[in-house]
Image (cartoon, grey):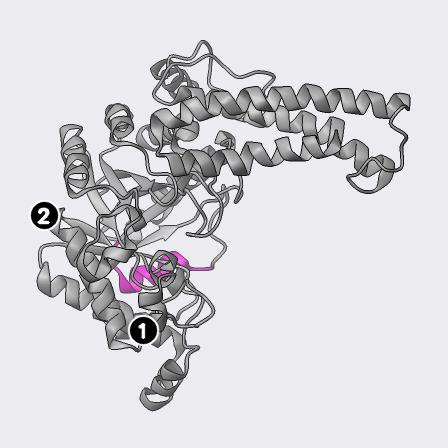
């Protein structure tokens, strides 16, 4: 039976909604209390890249001192830091810049790097070098490499594949191997982790022959409450890798525009992983642990989904479920008390009659999110569905304004408009306490202003 080291990592996805350091300082003690012992930090454009990489840094990127401060705060709370730098796919934040257009695999898409251009390897190694410089003596480093959807498509890659007799999966493995060799040569005491999904449909022998098994440890990610629908994935991985990691989700995996977290769904995902750990552990030397991912966007260009404060209850319940080995009434009660809620935390905000009273860092954002869920439901039921059923579109041309039915609808529009304006003002204030102005503006525009404008159009 494998020895379980028990890493419980909280993934901080910083793209689009990086919290202020003051907020991280408030929540790190909670993570420690809930038995988290590490952070998987995906800086993306929030890292203070410099030199040739300076264009990659957002105008609101953390400073070097900020990054060091995050490391110190983590250390003070016994949280191991593992940085994550994408090195193949999900490089929109890099490949959107004119300086790096030439490194795209597909000129029309910003997602994937061309693995056949020498500058591609130099780019990702320089990114890793700069991140490493602010995280000395790392035990682990995550190189991403998931969802490389554009692969072997450019003329250079096609010619290389033909000349060297490579398949697309061999091309993928070759790039990852090159990245791993470069990093391990410079940082021999640091072990590399990568996402597993590009291995799932590959033959075990092909992966084994690439030599990747001695260079990286895969993090097997899956966010649904049911088991991974790939036959014999564990048997295959055990033939190549001695050690593996797991990846769950506490938010950011149930809808691209989701803003309130369905805790029931995420608890189901973690219960599934507990079953997998028990069933498959004997196939490996170690199941290192699990990273509870909290995606902020589905990619660099999509809208923001649940913000971190809105998902703190989900994170607490999921962490404690993993730590204790099951979701129990005791877990539910303990986390609810930790967050100073007047009752048990609701597991499904979409079925809750009213928001609970709680007191934890960012709780206003959590409570306002639940209120917005119910306001949006009223908007859908009392306004949008009415126009669809009565007229087939969203205008009021077919009903005279003096009609009783239209009068009632317009009156409801005015009431909802007032409610949206009120919740907008509250959100602006609460969000500004945690996030930078660009996050506040984007979130309000996507989730509130668009409905205000639609209501005004009806009136």
Q: What residue range appears in magenta?
A: 231-243
Q: Residue at x 29, y 32 (%)?
A: 20
Instruction: Indicate the quadrant where residue 29 lies.
Output: top left
Instruction: Please give left or right for residue 197 compared with residue 79 in the image.
Output: right
* Label number found at residue 439: none
Relative depth, front residue between 128 and 212: 128
Asked if residue 336 is positioned above or below residue 441 in the image, the reply reads above
Q: Residue at x 22, y 34 (%)?
A: 37
The residue singled out by tag 1 in the image is 115
Residue 236 falls inside the magenta stretch:
yes
Residue 58 falls inside the magenta stretch:
no
Q: Residue at x 28, y 28 (%)?
A: 31
Q: CA distance from mark 2 to mark 1?
A: 28 Å
Few, some or many C-alpha atoms within 10 Å of disc 1 (few <14, some 14-19, many ≥20)?
many
Residue 199 placement (x, y as % from top left): 37, 64
* Label number found at residue 136: 2
Residue 382 placement (x, y as % from top left): 75, 26
Few, some or many C-alpha atoms within 10 Å of disc 2 (few <14, some 14-19, many ≥20)?
few
Relative depth, front residue between 101 and 29: 101
Asked if residue 191 is positioned above or below residue 388 in the image, the reply reads below
Could one spot residue 63 in this view of the protein? yes
Residue lying at the far top of the rendered structure: 342
């Amino acid at each position: 039976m494998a020895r379980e080291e028990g890493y419980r990592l909280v993934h901080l996805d910083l793209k689009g909604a990086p919290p202020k350091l003051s907020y991280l300082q408030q929540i790190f003690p909670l993570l420690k209390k809930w038995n988290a012992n590490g952070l998987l930090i995906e800086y993306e454009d929030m890292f203070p890249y410099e030199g040739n990489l300076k264009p990659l840094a957002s105008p609101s990127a953390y400073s070097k001192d900020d990054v060091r401060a995050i490391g110190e705060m983590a250390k003070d709370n016994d949280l191991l830091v593992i940085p994550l730098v994408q090195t193949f796919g999900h490089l929109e934040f890099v490949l959107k810049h004119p300086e790096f257009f030439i490194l795209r695999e597909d000129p029309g898409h910003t997602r994937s790097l061309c693995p056949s251009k020498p500058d591609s390897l130099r780019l990702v190694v320089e990114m890793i070098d700069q991140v490493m410089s602010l995280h000395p003596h790392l035990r682990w480093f995550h190189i991403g490499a998931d969802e490389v959807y554009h692969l072997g498509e450019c003329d250079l890659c096609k010619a290389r594949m033909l000349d060297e007799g490579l398949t697309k999966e061999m091309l993928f493995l070759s790039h990852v191997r090159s990245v791993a060799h470069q990093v391990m040569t410079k940082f021999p005491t640091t072990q590399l982790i990568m996402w597993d999904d590009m291995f799932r449909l590959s033959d075990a022998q092909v992966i084994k022959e690439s030599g990747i098994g001695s260079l990286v440890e895969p993090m097997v990610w899956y966010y649904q409450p049911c088991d991974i629908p790939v036959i014999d994935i564990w048997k295959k991985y055990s033939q190549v890798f001695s050690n593996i990691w797991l990846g769950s989700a506490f938010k950011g995996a149930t809808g691209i525009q989701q803003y309130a977290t369905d805790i029931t769904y995420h608890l189901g995902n973690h219960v599934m992983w507990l079953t997998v750990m028990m069933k498959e552990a004997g196939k490996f030397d170690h199941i290192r642990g699990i990273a509870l991912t909290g995606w902020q966007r589905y990619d660099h260009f999509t809208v923001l989904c649940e913000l971190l404060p809105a998902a703190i209850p989900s994170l607490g319940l999921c962490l404690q479920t993993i730590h204790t080995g099951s979701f129990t009434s005791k877990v539910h009660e303990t986390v609810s008390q930790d967050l100073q809620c007047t009752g048990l935390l609701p597991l499904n905000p979409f079925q809750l009659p009213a928001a609970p009273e709680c007191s934890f860092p960012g709780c206003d954002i959590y409570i306002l999110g639940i209120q917005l869920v119910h306001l949006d439901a009223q908007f859908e039921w009392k306004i949008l569905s009415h126009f669809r059923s009565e007229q087939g579109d969203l205008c009021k041309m077919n009903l005279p304004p003096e009609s009783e039915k239209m009068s009632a609808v317009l009156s409801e529009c005015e009431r909802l408009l007032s409610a949206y304006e009120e919740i907008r003002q509250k959100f602006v204030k609460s969000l500004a306490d945690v996030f930078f102005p660009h996050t506040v503006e984007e979130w309000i525009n996507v989730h509130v202003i668009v409905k205000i404008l639609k209501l005004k159009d009806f009136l």
